């Protein structure tokens, strides 16, 4: 019988088993070490993470927000444009859109979505993509506490923080933070701010299509920005709508309808947009001086005296006045020239690049010429809209369409031009104005500023011409000289000679002066009323000589003018001093309110983020402590200013408005460097100014206050006074009416200055003012002295 082999294992098998045992032990040890190290690392990272419990009372950085008196937002200032909206106030359609595209399992996971991670890994392996799987909770952790760097430490920290957030906050609190915190482009943080930035509407009013567009922004707030990249934004919007349908948030019919809904993005040229940038900036400066850097983060709300409808009327009227002036000026040529390719996509990119440096300026639109001929011009805007100009629309630049036009002037393919809507609502070529302007309106009863436009465009120039521009007021200053003269015995019927005057160097502070009337002619003797209606310089100078420059200087300071800006000399009578439009508005308010001095008021109250009032400014009370001039002086001056409107240099405004309670005065300085109109209705004062920052003649022939500034004032008042009843004046004490003219009761005919500046043969009556008490007959020597003075 054969023997069996021995069961003793070979050396090789024994060594294999020993190696396996050692490997198993080492592997187990390594796992233990790794787990221990990982645990230590997690504990280390976890220990360094911030306490998330503070988010239960979420307080993000909130900007300063500035509002009109009727609650319209006019400005935001801060690192982040944001509105804090409670989760209950967020529309369901937006929450559905965000959850569909960002975190469909938000209410199911505990902060980290394992299924989502597995799905993303599988998709990445299958398609070679980099699909993320961050939950909304993780995004909150990252946006509030962490950076966006792509490191394992940050990812672990993000996951740990997400778990903490889920333990300490409710789902509603987490979603509320996300919806208010996320960056969405256009300096907007949170969906409420983005809704205003992109659509110009409150979040509560958005549609499904708009919600889908907004929900597509968190992944790529710059590349999917609908304003700068409409095609990419559209792709994201359609993706969100598809996801909303998949999750059951909307039906297929709703998705289809939303996909075809045209979106109305906020446009700088949108006539509904309220422009009050100069006011907002003024408020910002004021509050920063009081609250410092916290002004931009603590959610302050400042409410102004502005009325939105009045502000819109002022903005439109000033811009129209300036653009109308530009139409009368020579065309200066295109702003730039670019080479345009013929291929469609390349053409779109070239146009976008060209107009990035030439953004729209409100309703003055930038465009690139695609083709141009003597009869027709086609241009394209940055948003792709094609514009066709012909006929009257080409008239302002007719010379630039000629083949003989200089290269810098000629309108050819690739020229960057400006267009605007004309009177017939068709496009016409225009140009960015070089001239500037200002308009301010205030309530004369309390100084509340109802409208303020500090220039043609805040983006073009942040210099506020209403409060910062010191300019010569020209003839719009004459009423203050006439007001002083009333106190010296002049009346509306006082006759003064409109005849030439000449002053040698000694009489005029070292320089000879031969003033002229604006039209260069003289009309001889005329009443004070007629002289103001026709704005006669010679008459005003004779009046100034009579009352003396020093007295006039004292008198005009009662209206708020600065003494050092109004030198006590004869040219002051013609508006040679310096004023701001705001000063002029406050000064004319004295006439409008019956003689009281008011200070312009802009801010009514300031509140914190919780709407608790921090400061509140009560309207002033007009009483005798604020009286600047006698009530009877203001009343008689108003009769003179009313005559200016009905039959003088302001008559075009009266013809347009057809109201008997209008008062005002035009102003034009030497060589037409500045044009003004200052006027009022008893409840509203308005002042318009137009001129160049570096003073130069307005127009080849020279414009006037009546041709330039008066239309601006008229356009504003036409809107602002709608529905306002005509105010009948009531005469105060101390006046008498004789033959339809109001007089001070102690300066009636026969007891006042009656005639000034007549020839020797036209002897003035004994009542002529000579320095003696009113009613005291002057001597023959005094009569001769007066006559010599006013020849």
Image (cartoon, grey):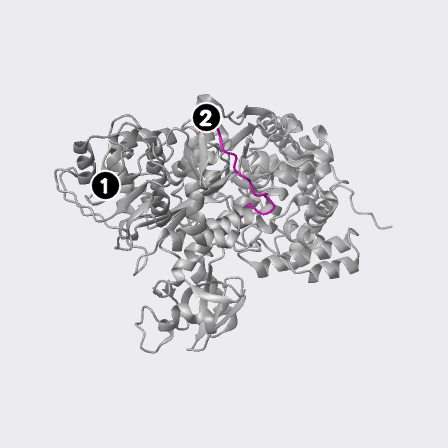
Question: x%, y% of residue 154?
Answer: 57, 37
Residue 37 visible at all: yes
Is 111 placed above or below 272 here? above
- Is the stretch drawn in magenta largely helix, strand or loop? loop
Question: x%, y% of residue 356?
Answer: 45, 58
| Along the viewing direction, whichever of 510 and 369 lies nearer the viewer | 510
Q: Which residue is mark 2?
A: 290
Q: Which mark is residue 20?
A: none
Q: Earlier in the sequence, mark 1 or mark 2?
A: 2
Q: Which mark is residue 763?
A: 1
Question: x%, y% of residue 297?
Answer: 52, 31
Find the magenta span and give its range: 721-734
- Label 2 Cα crowd, 10 Å radius (few <14 / some 14-19 / many 20+): few
Quarter of the image for residue 641 reads top left
Drawn side of residue 362 relative to residue 272, left or right: left
| Along the viewing direction, whichever of 342 and 149 lies nearer the viewer | 342
Quarter of the image for residue 512 reads top left
Question: Which quadrant of the figure contains the C terminus?
Answer: top left
Q: Residue pushed farthest right?
A: 1
Mark 1 secondary-structure assignment: loop
Mark 2 secondary-structure assignment: helix
Question: x%, y% of residue 779?
Answer: 20, 30
Residue drawn at the location 78% of the way across and 42% of the way down = 7
| Along the viewing direction, whichever of 137 and 568 lies nearer the viewer | 568
**In this view, the mark in front (1 or 2):** 1
Residue drawn at the location 59% of the way across and 35% of the way down = 144
- Label 1 Cα crowd, 10 Å radius (few <14 / some 14-19 / many 20+): few
Residue 586 visible at all: no
- Is residue 306 rendered magenta in the image? no
Residue drawn at the location 35% of the way across and 30% of the way down = 487
Q: CA distance from mark 1 to mark 2?
A: 64 Å
């Amino acid at each position: 019988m054969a023997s069996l082999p021995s069961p003793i294992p070979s050396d090789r098998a024994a060594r294999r088993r020993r190696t396996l045992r050692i490997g198993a032990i080492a592997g187990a040890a390594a796992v233990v070490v790794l787990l221990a190290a990982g645990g230590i690392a997690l504990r280390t990272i976890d220990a360094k993470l911030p306490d998330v419990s503070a988010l239960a009372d979420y307080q993000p950085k909130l900007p300063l927000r500035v509002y009109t008196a009727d609650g319209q937002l006019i400005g935001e200032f801060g690192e982040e444009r944001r509105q804090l909206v409670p989760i209950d106030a967020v529309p369901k359609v937006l929450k559905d859109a965000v959850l569909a595209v960002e975190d469909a399992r938000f209410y199911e996971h505990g902060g980290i979505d394992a299924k989502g991670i597995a799905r993303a890994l599988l998709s990445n392996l299958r398609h070679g993509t980099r699909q993320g799987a961050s939950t909304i909770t993780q995004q909150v952790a990252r946006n509030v506490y962490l950076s966006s760097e792509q490191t394992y430490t940050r990812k672990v920290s993000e996951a740990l923080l997400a778990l903490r957030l889920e333990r300490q906050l409710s789902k509603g609190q987490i979603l509320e933070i996300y919806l208010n915190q996320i960056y969405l482009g256009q300096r907007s943080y949170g969906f409420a701010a983005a809704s205003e930035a992109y659509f110009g509407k409150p979040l509560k009013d958005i549609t499904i299509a708009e919600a889908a567009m907004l929900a597509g922004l968190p992944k790529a707030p710059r590349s999917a920005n609908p304003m700068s990249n409409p095609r990419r934004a559209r792709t994201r919007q359609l993706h969100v709508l598809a996801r909303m349908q998949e999750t059951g948030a909307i039906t297929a019919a709703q998705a289809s309808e939303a996909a075809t809904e045209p979106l109305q993005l906020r446009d700088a040229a949108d006539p509904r947009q309220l422009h009050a940038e100069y006011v907002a900036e003024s408020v910002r400066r004021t509050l920063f001086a009081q609250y410092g850097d916290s002004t931009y983060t603590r959610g302050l709300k400042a409410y102004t005296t502005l009325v939105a409808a009045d502000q819109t009327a002022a903005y439109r009227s000033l811009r129209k006045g300036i653009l109308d002036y530009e139409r009368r000026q020579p065309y200066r040529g295109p702003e730039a020239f670019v080479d345009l390719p013929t291929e469609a996509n390349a053409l779109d990119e070239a146009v976008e690049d060209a107009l990035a440096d030439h953004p729209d300026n409100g309703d003055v639109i930038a465009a690139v010429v695609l083709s141009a001929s003597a009869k027709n011009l086609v241009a394209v805007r940055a948003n792709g809209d094609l514009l066709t100009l012909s006929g009257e629309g080409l008239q302002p630049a007719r010379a630039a369409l000629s083949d003989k036009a200089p290269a810098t002037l000629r309108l050819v393919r690739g020229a960057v031009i400006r267009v605007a809507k004309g009177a017939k609502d068709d496009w016409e070529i225009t140009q960015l104005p070089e001239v500037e302007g200002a308009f301010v309106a205030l309530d004369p009863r309390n100084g509340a500023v109802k409208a303020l436009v500090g220039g043609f465009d805040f983006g073009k120039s942040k210099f506020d011409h209403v409060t910062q521009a010191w300019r010569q007021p020209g003839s719009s200053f004459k009423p203050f000289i006439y007001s002083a003269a009333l106190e010296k015995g002049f009346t509306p019927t006082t006759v003064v000679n409109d005849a030439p005057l000449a002053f040698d160097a000694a009489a005029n502070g070292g320089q000879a002066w031969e003033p002229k009337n604006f039209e260069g002619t003289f009309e001889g003797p005329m009443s004070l009323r007629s002289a103001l209606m026709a704005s006669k310089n010679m008459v005003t100078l004779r009046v100034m000589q009579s009352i003396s420059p020093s007295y006039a200087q004292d008198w005009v300071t009662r209206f708020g003018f600065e003494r050092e800006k109004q030198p006590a000399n004869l040219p002051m009578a013609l508006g040679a001093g310096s004023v701001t439009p705001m000063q002029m508005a406050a000064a004319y308010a004295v006439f409008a309110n019956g003689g009281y001095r008011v200070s312009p008021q802009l801010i009514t109250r300031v509140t914190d983020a919780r709407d608790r009032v921090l400061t509140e400014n009560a309207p002033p009370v007009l009483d005798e402590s604020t009286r600047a001039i006698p009530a009877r002086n203001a009343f008689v001056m108003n009769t003179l200013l009313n005559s200016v409107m009905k039959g003088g240099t302001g008559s075009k405004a009266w013809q347009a408005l057809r109201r008997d309670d209008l008062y005002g005065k035009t102003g034009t300085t030497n060589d037409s460097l500045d044009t003004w109109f200052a006027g009022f209705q008893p409840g509203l004062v308005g002042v318009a100014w137009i001129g160049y920052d570096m003073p130069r003649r307005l127009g080849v022939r020279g414009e006037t206050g009546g041709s330039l500034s008066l239309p601006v004032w008229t356009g504003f008042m036409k809107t602002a006074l709608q529905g306002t009843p005509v105010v009948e004046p009531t005469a105060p004490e101390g006046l008498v009416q004789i033959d339809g003219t109001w007089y001070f009761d102690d300066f009636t005919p026969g007891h006042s200055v009656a005639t000034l500046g007549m020839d020797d043969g036209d002897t003035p009556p004994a009542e002529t003012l000579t320095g003696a008490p009113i009613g005291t007959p002057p001597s023959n020597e005094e009569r001769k002295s007066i006559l010599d003075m006013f020849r």
